[in-house]
Image: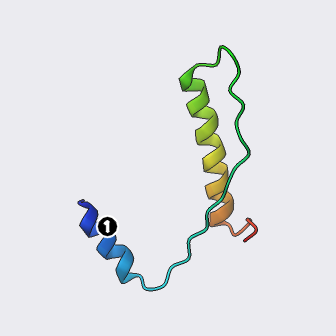
């Protein structure tokens, strides 16, 4: 699907509410590889999204 189609779908929703959530920094230690770091970042974002979808984040 093209970007314009996505934008049009969002505009048809009417009023929407966006929440920006900041996570604690992930410390990158010497010797950590990018794949391990990617897994850690993905887990952090996934947990935040699940919490947001369940209404468990402070606004």
Q: In this view, does 25 lie above or below 34?
A: below
Q: Is residue 8 left or right of residue 28?
A: left
Q: Is residue 22 above or below residue 39?
A: below
Q: Is residue 2 left or right of residue 56?
A: left
**x then y, percent, for residue 39:** 59, 33
Query: Which of the image's four quarters has the N terminus?
Result: bottom left
Q: Is residue 13 left or right of residue 5?
A: right
Closer to the camera in the image, 55 or 31: 31
Q: Looking at the image, which residue is at 70% across and 49% down?
A: 23
Quarter of the image where one finds residue 27 = top right
Number of numbered discs visible in the structure rendering: 1
Q: Which residue lies furthest to the top in this view?
A: 31
Quarter of the image where one finds residue 13 = bottom left
Q: Residue furthest bottom?
A: 14
Quarter of the image where one finds residue 59 = bottom right
Instruction: Name the residue tied to disc 1.
Output: 6
Q: Looking at the image, which residue is at 68% across and 16% down?
A: 30
Secondary structure beneath label 1: helix
**x then y, percent, for residue 47:** 67, 50
Q: Looking at the image, which residue is at 61% across and 63% down?
A: 20
Q: Looking at the image, which residue is at 27% across and 62% down?
A: 3
Closer to the camera in the image, 59 or 39: 59
Q: Label 1 crowding class (10 Å Cα cut-off): few <14, some 14-19, many 20+?
A: few
**x then y, percent, for residue 28:** 68, 26
**x then y, percent, for residue 7:** 32, 70
Give the colour scheme of this rendering: rainbow
């Amino acid at each position: 699907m093209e970007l314009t189609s996505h934008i049009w779908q969002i505009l048809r929703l009417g009023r929407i509410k966006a929440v920006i959530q900041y996570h604690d920094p992930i410390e990158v230690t010497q010797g950590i590889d990018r794949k391990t770091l990617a897994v850690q970042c993905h887990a952090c974002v996934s947990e935040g999204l699940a919490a947001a979808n369940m209404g468990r984040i402070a606004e």
